[in-house]
Amino acid sequence: MKDIATENFQRIRDAYEILTDEHKRQIYDIYGFEGLTSGLELGAKLSKPEEIKEELERLRRRQEEEKVYAHVRPVGSLLATLSLPQFLSGGSIMRG
């Protein structure tokens, strides 16, 4: 019972925090809790719902790109010696 009461209290506290902050409430009204956790902030240039939607979509795309790039970012280096005349004449690459 204590765990359930603690969880309910946390939810009520979070709801109160959102409802008493005008900017958080605007974001929540449009996008729900996900809009608040995405890092979207309203400012002078994000006053219309369409602008807020565009900014949220841009942030979502950026987060997805960062997830992908985290797995494919090159780490390390490669050193190769190449003879341009041999390469252009179709010669084979020697491995050492």
Image (cartoon, rainbow, N blue to C red):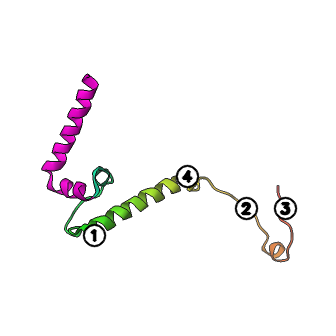
Magenta span includes 24: yes
Secondary structure of the residue carrying tag 3 is loop
Q: What residue type is labelled 2?
A: Ala
Q: Please name the residue shown 26% across and 22% down the image.
A: 1
Question: Mark 3–mark 2 contact, CB under 8 Å?
Answer: no
Q: Please name the residue shown 81% across and 72% down the image.
A: 87
Check disc 4 and report the residue beneath it: 71
Q: Camera-side residue: 59 or 32?
A: 32
Percent across and percent down for residue 45 are 23, 70
Q: What residue type is labelled 4?
A: His
Check disc 2 and report the residue beneath it: 80
Q: Please name the residue shown 22% across and 61% down the image.
A: 42
What's the distance in space between the residues labelled 1 and 3, CA to CA?
59 Å
Does 39 sit left or right of 91 as displayed?
left
Secondary structure of the residue carrying tag 2 is loop
Residue 45 position (above or below residue 16): below
Percent across and percent down for residue 83 are 79, 70
Q: Please name the residue shown 23% across and 35% down the image.
A: 10
Looking at the image, tell me whether mark 4 or mark 3 is earlier in sequence order: 4
Secondary structure of the residue carrying tag 4 is helix
Check disc 1 and report the residue beneath it: 50
Number of other residues with Cα within 10 Å of mark 4, as a class: few under 14, some 14 to 19, many 20 or more: few
Tag nearer the camera, 4 or 2: 4
Q: Residue 94 carries which label?
A: 3
Number of other residues with Cα within 10 Å of mark 1, as a class: few under 14, some 14 to 19, many 20 or more: few
What's the distance in space between the residues labelled 3 and 2, CA to CA?
10 Å
Looking at the image, tell me whether mark 3 or mark 2 is earlier in sequence order: 2
Tag nearer the camera, 1 or 2: 1
What's the distance in space between the residues labelled 1 and 2, CA to CA?
51 Å
